[in-house]
Image (cartoon, rainbow, N blue to C red):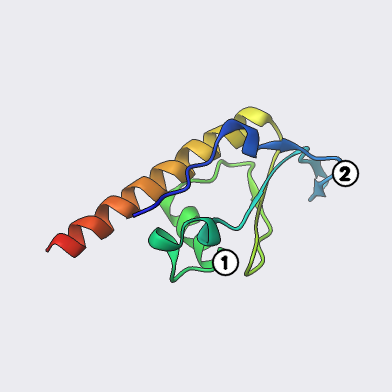
Amino acid sequence: MNIHFYQENDIRLSSESNNIDGKEYPFTFIADVPGDNPDVLGDYDNHVLADRLTRFGALGEDDRLDCESCCFYAFFAHKVDGLAFIERLNSYLSQKSRLLREAEAF
């Protein structure tokens, strides 16, 4: 089972202003996470993933999402917030992969 883990350089300083609810979010994470991880998230689109990550607690208090079916957009006020999100996203992918492998073995 292949898993694509995200790295520090996946959090980028945006070239344009991302003002959401009157607050600036200069750091972005943009990816097709289910497309990058079809073995683990093949039945998800990015909206479903956003819902699951919200329930899993992978979003910080000030993190903002604006997902489309084919693209996952996350916005962060500080790079450290984005890096914390990447860590939690990778943890989610790892845990889901482990559970799928255990289910297949059962």
Relative to residue 69, is residue 101 depicted above or below?
Answer: above
The numbered disc on residue 35 is none
- The single residue placed furthest to the right in the displayed view is 16
> Pointer 1: what residue?
47
Amino acid type assigned to the residue bearing label 2 in the image: Glu
Give coordinates of residue 93: x percent, y percent: 40, 49
Dividing the picture into quarters, in which one does residue 11 lie? top right
- Do callouts 2 and 1 mark residues in contact (Cβ within 8 Å)? no
Dividing the picture into quarters, in which one does residue 35 lie? bottom right
- Regarding mark 2 in the picture, which secondary structure is present there? loop
Whichever of labels 2 and 1 marks the residue nearer the N terminus, that label is 2
- Regarding mark 1 in the picture, which secondary structure is present there? helix
What residue is rendered at 39% in x and 52% in y?
2
- The single residue placed furthest to the left in the displayed view is 106
- Label 1 neighbourhood size at 10 Å, few (<14), some (14-19), many (20+)? some
- The single residue placed furthest to the front in the displayed view is 2
What residue is rendered at 69% in x and 31% in y?
78
Relative to residue 79, is residue 74 depicted above or below?
Answer: below
Q: With 18 as the anchor, is 81 left or right in this view?
A: left
Task: Work out how far the residue at label 2 is from the one at label 1, CA to CA, in angstroms.
Answer: 24 Å
Relative to residue 5, is residue 51 depicted above or below?
Answer: below
| Residue 41 visible here | yes
Give coordinates of residue 100: x percent, y percent: 27, 59
Amino acid type assigned to the residue bearing label 1 in the image: His
Q: With 70 as the anchor, is 93 left or right in this view?
A: left
- Quarter occupied by the N terminus: bottom left
> Pointer 2: what residue?
16
Number of marks drawn = 2
What residue is rendered at 20% in x and 64% in y?
104
Observer-nearest of 89 and 56? 89
| Residue 50 visible here | no
Give coordinates of residue 83: x percent, y percent: 57, 33
